[in-house]
Image: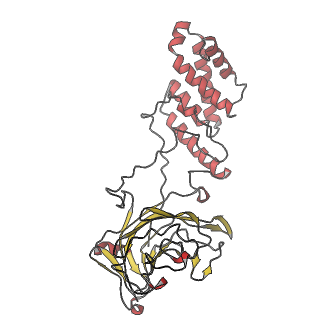
């Protein structure tokens, strides 16, 4: 079985694209016990580029396409769950869609996924006979067996937590946004699985569903995931990854244009975006600090000094501090020796260094009594640059 992991870039911004004298490195609130990066931190990784589909509903460039209308994509991405000798029929791919028929059983993806964005389109060729749950019934199952209901209830009422767009057995859709039978319906689903460890619910998970572009589930808590006529316990274990499944409920249902995008991890999973535990934050800050110091190795003069100071936003390294402290002290000594006219030419450099030291003092990274900072403050004040 394939597994598509969530990949987070840890590459720092190129120094060629961001000047170390831009002043922005010491700008927003500093890293703290739960945030590895400062607010507006230039060292925070840039989002990866994703090319959107040409039209709404088309797969973006980073999507895993599970069905593109061809027999080949059906055969390479899907498999029957029920053994062949137990099936009365098979799912087929024809005329640009997959068709589920009674007796075929479920099909599932060969690849496994965790949290994901799923796009899927479905339809009934015409209004089918039957009422309630007996008309056009199928379902989209996310990893762990949580279902978004598929049903023809355009003009067919049934129990509300089993209508199209429902998180089955958990929450009815906020609206019935179905098109009439014979037309294609679309689901865009954002799935965040429950996270349970040792019986402790760390995150109960959620589901957001758009039906034909209309929000019908808005970060709906999964409450353990529903089932037919029963609730599932919230503290049951859920798989980190699993297949996506489509249900055979005895009715012919067509599916097309199916693609999925793995989502970035959450802080509770050790992800690097959002609020982290103090332990995870400290580890990430140490990693960022080491990367920033490494980038300073090929720099010289004030560029290197500023970059080393930047690293102290994240963590303290005594060896680097000895180098940085010496460079700051020497730089201020050089500034004191300059004539006023020459010093005016260095205003930008002086103020960037002053702002960096003031920033680190404000957030307690370096002492408020740090003598070089006091001397630099005096120079800037005497020049009238602090007004």
Residue 166 location, x and y as percent?
52, 72
Q: Residue at x 63, y 27 (%)?
A: 357
Residue 78 location, x and y as percent?
38, 76
Q: Residue furthest front?
A: 155
Indicate whether 271 appears above or below 349.
Answer: below
Q: Quadrant of residue 91?
A: bottom left
Indicate whether 216 appears above or below 289.
Answer: below
Between 380 and 328, the residue placed more toward the observer is 380
Between 365 and 247, the residue placed more toward the observer is 247
How was the colour assigned to the protein in this rendering?
A: secondary structure
Question: Number of marks in the image?
Answer: 0
Q: Residue at x 29, y 75 (%)?
A: 71
Left or right, 333 with respect to 368, comes to left
Residue 99 location, x and y as percent?
34, 80
Left or right, 8 with respect to 126, comes to right
Quadrant occupied by the N terminus: bottom left
Indicate whether 367 appears above or below 169.
Answer: above
Indicate whether 37 appears above or below 355.
Answer: below
The answer to whether one can see residue 339 in this image is: no
Q: Residue at x 55, y 75 (%)?
A: 161
Q: Residue furthest right?
A: 369
Between 98 and 27, the residue placed more toward the observer is 98
Quadrant occupied by the C terminus: top right
Residue 31 location, x and y as percent?
62, 41
The answer to whether one can see residue 133 in this image is: yes
Q: Quadrant of residue 65?
A: bottom left
């Amino acid at each position: 079985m394939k597994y598509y992991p969530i990949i987070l870039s840890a590459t720092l911004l190129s120094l060629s694209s961001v000047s170390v004298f831009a002043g922005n490195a010491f700008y927003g609130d500093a890293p703290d016990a739960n945030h590895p990066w400062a607010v507006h931190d230039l060292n925070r990784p840039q989002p990866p580029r994703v090319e959107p589909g040409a039209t709404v509903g088309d797969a973006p460039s980073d999507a895993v396409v599970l069905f593109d209308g061809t027999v080949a994509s059906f055969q390479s991405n899907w498999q029957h769950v029920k053994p062949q000798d137990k099936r009365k029929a098979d799912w087929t791919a024809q005329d640009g869609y997959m068709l589920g028929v009674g007796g075929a059983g479920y099909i599932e993806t060969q690849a496994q996924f965790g949290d994901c964005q799923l796009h899927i389109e479905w339809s009934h060729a015409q209004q089918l006979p039957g009422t309630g749950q007996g008309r056009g019934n199928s379902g989209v199952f996310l990893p762990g067996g949580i279902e978004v209901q598929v049903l023809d209830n355009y003009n067919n009422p049934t129990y509300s937590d089993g209508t199209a767009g429902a998180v089955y057995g958990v929450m009815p859709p906020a609206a019935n946004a179905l098109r009439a039978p014979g037309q294609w319906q679309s689901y865009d689903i954002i799935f965040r699985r429950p996270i349970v460890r040792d019986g402790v619910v760390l995150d109960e998970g959620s589901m957001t569903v758009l039906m034909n572009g209309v929000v019908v589930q808005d970060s709906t808590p999964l409450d353990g995931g529903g089932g037919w006529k029963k609730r599932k316990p919230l503290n049951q274990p859920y798989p980190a990854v699993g297949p996506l499944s489509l249900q055979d409920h005895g009715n012919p249902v067509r599916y097309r244009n199916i693609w999925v995008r793995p989502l970035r991890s959450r802080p509770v999973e050790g992800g690097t975006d959002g609020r982290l535990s103090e332990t995870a934050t400290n580890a990430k800050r140490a990693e960022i600090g080491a990367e920033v110091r490494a980038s300073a190795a090929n720099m010289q003069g004030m560029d290197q000094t500023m970059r080393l100071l930047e690293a102290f936003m994240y963590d303290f390294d005594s060896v680097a501090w000895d180098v940085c402290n010496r460079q700051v002290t020497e730089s201020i000594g050089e500034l004191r020796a300059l004539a006023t006219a020459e010093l005016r030419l260095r205003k930008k450099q002086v103020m960037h260094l002053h702002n960096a030291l003031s920033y680190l003092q404000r957030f307690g990274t370096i002492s408020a009594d740090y003598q070089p900072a006091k001397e630099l403050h005096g120079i800037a004040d005497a020049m009238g640059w602090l007004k």
